[in-house]
Amino acid sequence: TYWAASIILDFTEGLHKLMEDNQVSRSDLARRLGVSPAYITKVLRGNVNFTVDSMVRLVRAVGGEVHVQVAPKTRTKRNNFYKKQGIRKAA
């Protein structure tokens, strides 16, 4: 749940920044998509269940594009500390 919420937050923050950069209001975006301004408010709060299709429609309506990146899991600093010290963590 934490990781999904983090992705939703990144998406909504990015969408909001694009809206600001392109001077698109919530009402403008709602009109472009044929939805209510209340729906756009829910979107920006992260209170909707996004699909890839809805994410693409939202972002393209404000002049952007969506990129999805898959990457290997990053190690925490704590794990790196143990490696540098030559200490094996207990299983």
Image (cartoon, rainbow, N blue to C red):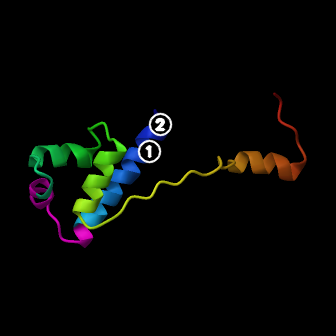
Q: What is the residue that sits farthest to the top in this orientation?
A: 91
The answer to whether marks 1 and 2 mark residues whose Cβ atoms lie closer than 8 Å is: yes
Amino acid of disc 2: Tyr
Residue in the image at 15% along x and 53% along y: 33
Magenta-drawn stretch contains 22: yes
Query: x, y percentage for residue 30?
Result: 12, 53
Which quadrant of the figure has residue 29? bottom left
Q: What is the residue that sits farthest to the front in this orientation?
A: 53
Cα distance, mark 1 to mark 2?
A: 6 Å
Which quadrant holds the C terminus?
A: top right
Amino acid of disc 1: Ser
Residue in the image at 10% along x and 50% along y: 34
Query: x, y percentage for residue 6?
Result: 44, 45
Q: How would you rate the neighbour count of disc 2 (Cα within 10 Å): few for under 14, some for 14-19, many for 20 or more? A: few
What residue is shown with label 1?
Answer: 6
> Toward the viewer: 8 or 70?
70
**What range is drawn magenta here?**
20-31
